[in-house]
Image (cartoon, rainbow, N blue to C red):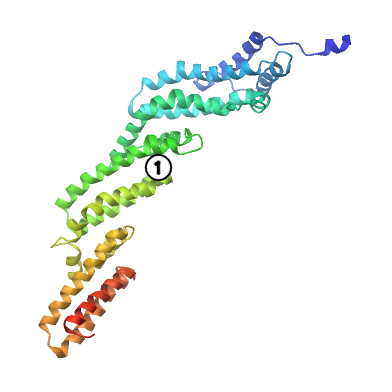
Amino acid sequence: MDSRRMSRPRQIKFEEGWSNIQKGITKLIRILEGEPEPTFYFSECFKLYTIIYDMCVQRSDYSQQLYEKYRKVIEDYTIQTVLPSLREKHDEDMLRELVKRWNNHKIMVKWLSKFFVYIDRHLVRRSKIPIPSLDEVGLTCFLDLVYCEMQSTAKEVVIALIHKEREGEQIDRALVKNVLDIYVENGMGTLEKYEEDFESFMLQDTASYYSRKASRWTEEDSCPDYMIKVEECLKMERERVTHYLHSITEPKLVEKIQNELLVMVTKNRLENEHSGFSALLRDDKKNDLSRIYRLYLPIPKRLGRVADLFKKHITEEGNALIKQADDKTTNQLLIELHNKFIVYVIECFQNHTLFHKALEEAFETLRSQGGSE
């Protein structure tokens, strides 16, 4: 009996154990802050793990106290070191510091979770009342203390950078991507933070930006030149998604641009007497007509309007021919006219049913007015 008592592990008092753990935590923080400090050796990590393990399995179970200390270590470091370093920086420098601090935070949580891993096994998983895991505690500390304070400012800086890029300036796309990843990762498995704290504002800014562009371009440019600019804008915005925006943003972003640059100006652009849709048919501008079709294809209601203009043009051109022709030549002229416009349906409008229908309806009208093709 006495020998068994003598072989029992020595009981570690909380203050003694925590003092040793704190030395390892101090070393980790010094490494994160770039101070001269050798990396952790396996023996050091194992020693810290063993101390924590022993403090949990001995008669005096300190697992709850260690769990709270784990949270406090992260909170104290964040409040005393991380936030001041962010508050003193501005614009892109602030974004770079935010990315650095987020990466450091993840490293800190990773290492601390290794040291304290037995807490997850011993306390978290066995708790009758669900409590957050060590990883969840660590990430929540950043979310509550850093993200909630900095996300609004970071959002404004990122939107300003996107504006600069739209105006032709080069920006640090990798930096923007890394910042937006913080919004995604702080969603704790969802895209809620990204969508509510960044995307919604960026989309609103996008609509305002392209509304201003549409007002200017409709005054300055012909319909073909305008459509070239729209096509280029859509291409560039899709590239932005590829480089730094989340893929979920693409359909919303494209819809905003289509609405401002195409839907809102359909009548102004396509019914322009000198360079609109009818003028392009008159001048046989197949490339420009194909571009209009491509741009309006994803917008069914407006594509229907394009098909109506096609029908109207055919009807007007056909009526002009009928007025000039006699009974012997009318049918032949209508056949030639049909052959002419079926080429547009095939080559420019990709055999779309709306344009086949527009062509046939136009010729039904023409046949009823003067010929029987």
For residue 95, above or below residue 307: above
Residue 327 at what x, y percent from top left? 14, 89
The answer to which quarter of the image holds residue 129 is top right
Looking at the image, which residue sits at the far left?
A: 324
Q: Which residue is under mark 1?
A: 245
Residue 291 seen in render? no
Is residue 212 rendered to the left or right of residue 90?
Answer: left
The answer to which quarter of the image holds residue 207 is top left
For the residue labelled by badge 1, is the local secondary structure a helix, a strand or a loop?
loop
| Residue positioned 19% across, 81% down in the render | 368
Looking at the image, which residue sits at the far front?
A: 129
Near-viewer residue (366 or 106) = 366
Is residue 358 rendered to the left or right of residue 239?
Answer: left
Is residue 16 rendered to the left or right of residue 304?
Answer: right
Residue 197 at what x, y percent from top left? 38, 34
Near-viewer residue (113 or 20) = 113
What amino acid is at disc 1?
Leu
For residue 326, above or below residue 283: below
| Residue positioned 42% across, 37% down in the render | 194
Near mark 1 (Cα within 10 A), the count class, few <14, some 14-19 or many ≥20, is many
In which quadrant is the N terminus drawn?
top right
For residue 40, above or below residue 354: above
| Residue positioned 76% across, 11% down in the render | 10
Residue 20 seen in render? yes
Residue 38 at what x, y percent from top left? 58, 20
| Residue positioned 50% across, 34% down in the render | 188
Near-viewer residue (131 or 209) = 131
In which quadrant is the C terminus drawn?
bottom left
For residue 370, above or below residue 15: below
